[in-house]
Amino acid sequence: MLQIQNLSVAYGNHVALQDVSLAVAPGEMLAVIGPNGAGKSTMVRAISGIQPIRSGGVLIGEQLLPVHELSAAERARLLAVVPQARELPGAFTVYETVLLGRTAYLGWMGKSQKQDRDLVAWALARTNLSGLAQRRVAELSGGEQQRVLLARALVQSAPVLLLDEPTTNLDLQHQSGLLNLVRELAVEKQLAVLVVLHDLNLAGLYCDRVALVVNGRLQAIGSPQDVLTSQNLTDTFHVPIEVIRHPAYGTPLVLPDGVAHMPHTTSFPTL
Amino acid sequence: MKIIRVHPYIVNLLLLLLAFIASVAIGAVAIGPDTVVSVFLAKIPGVSIPVDWSQATETIIFRVRLPHTILILLTGAALAGSGATYQGLFRNPLADPYLIGVASGAGLGAVIAMSRSWPNDWLSLYSVPFAAFMGALLTVFIVYTLARTGATLQTTTLILAGVAVSSFATALTSFLMLRSSAEMQRALGWLLGGGMLAGWAPVLGILPYICLGLGIMVFLGHPLNVLQFGDDQAQQMGLSVERTKRIIIIIASLTTAAAVAFSGIIGFVGLIVPHLIRMIWGPDYRLLIPLSIIGGATLLLLADILARVVMAPQVLPLGIVTAMFGAPFFLWILWRSKSSVTW
């Protein structure tokens, strides 16, 4: 369970997030979308406790504990973050990297128990990395590195999972592979998942609900059909945007309109 | 190659033992390594070995060679251990107590204290290391603040800040030495890692700092591993980053300062040793730090033997020997790091 109440964050005089309230239930997957600089990454930083907040609060776990009053280790047991794969030390092996996800449970010496190693083996198997366990992270592809970060977050055994643009730099196959896996895990482990996504179609396809953030404010939140509308998106991105129905799943498909080199002949069946 | 990988501690301790015996054996009066071993074994209660060496030999070993060897051993251990620790803290393989200016800062602190209580005042055994510690802490703080751009620490800015702060500290040190009495000329030799105090006094002086520093340092491996992911991720993985970093800075600076206060400014040991260890045994700081401590002791003992042998009977300042080998090594790492992403 993740509950954000009237959250405001500021960098100096610049207000990055203003009065945002939302909740993610166990087993639910919420996409956070919005233009560049809207405050999506700030939201992840604030929720995970590394960005000081101006007002409001974030409550996590069954007991709804306030994130900003917990120690780093207590927080890491309740909330795991999958960052973008850009900043990952290359010299550790996949196994070492994932095991370090257990930091909140290990002592100062970092000595692992059988239970820790079993969990790592499970996470590696689940993210399809078992065969790469002894490889150095630097030797892996972008998609594999992103899975390493997911596995590292999974071994934190936290009920809340945040992902910050996990599909950036991934090809189509790895995009859908990763989000399918997150979706499965959300249901299987009853995780409350908040995922920042750039790709509106992925948000519509994989997430139960979508939150649209513009200029640090929560513009709309609800089912993909309710939020991903032509009106909402055109207003947000300042380009004409058409939304049609996915032929197989009925979810919204977002298409930018006004392509300069093509005459506009047919009109799309709008949602 | 396999034995090297399987038993890193055994390999390193064996090398250290050999360097230790060589260091005691080699000098103006040559003593055979077998004699050295016998003299030590004879001191163990219950071991009886026929005495076939002179009393003079025993005096040389226990009054001159052994304290000198132990001081060098502790200094090398401290420098390489803090080098590895700084590298983990700054997430940068080129962070060395000398290159980032911490050693010079400690040197300045030490000289300030010395100019008040030199020479051999019993008080200096306490005030010099303390002043060196303060100098080291201040330097780390300045260099870290200067080199930090946003959340990241660039190699170039780190080294540049280190060079600038180091030059400033060295200039102040030189000024202090030139201004004071002729006796301070001795300090120049000390500063180059040469004219160290002889006998057991400096060993007893350095021992508590080194024991405390290295004793805590070997427990910093796991938090340093986590810090390699950057401050934000480390925090999200459950490490209280600010507190951990503070402990790491204090311990590394204390250890560096102790080495500088008693042995002078000796560069590049903290760079070479962790780098070689990392190449052979990998990046896990839980292994890297203790192995660097052992390896640093070995390497500095070898450098010291060289310093005593090359121009015998004249003894070269140790800092000159390590720089002659270390600076080219530094350039090699720099050249290599241009083409590789891992370290």
Image (tube, coloured by chain):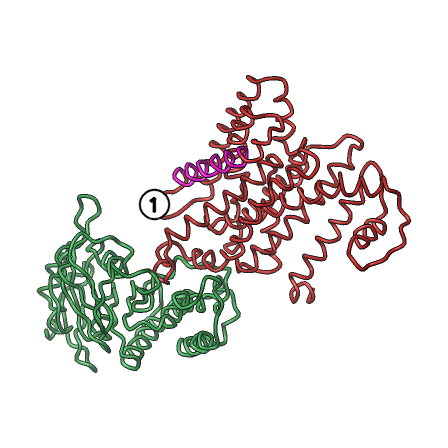
Q: Nearer the viewer, residue A245 or A58?
A: A58
Kind of residue indicated by mark 1: Gly
Q: Colour of chain A?
A: green
Q: Colour of chain B?
A: red
Inspect the magenta stretch and tell me whether residue A120 lies in it: no
Q: Label 1 lies in what chain?
A: B
Q: Is residue A243 above or below residue A18?
A: below
Task: Give the secondary structure at mark 1.
Answer: loop
Magenta residues, dominant SS class:
helix
Q: Which residue is mark 1?
A: B150
Which percent across, then down, holds residue B114?
56, 27
- Residue at image coords 52%, 52%: B217
Q: Nearer the viewer, residue B266 or B264?
A: B264
Q: Is residue A226 above or below residue B172?
A: below
Which percent across, then down, holds residue B156?
46, 40
- Residue at image coords 41%, 48%: B246
- Residue at image coords 30%, 64%: A75
Rendered-image quadrant of the C terminus of chain A: bottom left
Inspect the magenta stretch and tell me whether residue B145 lies in it: yes
On screen, residue A88 versus residue A183, left or right, reads right
Q: Is residue B239 above or below residue B148?
A: below
Q: Nearer the viewer, residue A253 or B305?
A: B305
- Report crowding for label 1: few under 14, some 14 to 19, many 20 or more residues within 10 A (C-alpha): few
Which percent across, then down, holds residue A199?
25, 66
| Residue segment shown in magenta | B127-146
Rendered image quadrant of residue A176: bottom left
- Residue at image coords 33%, 71%: A175
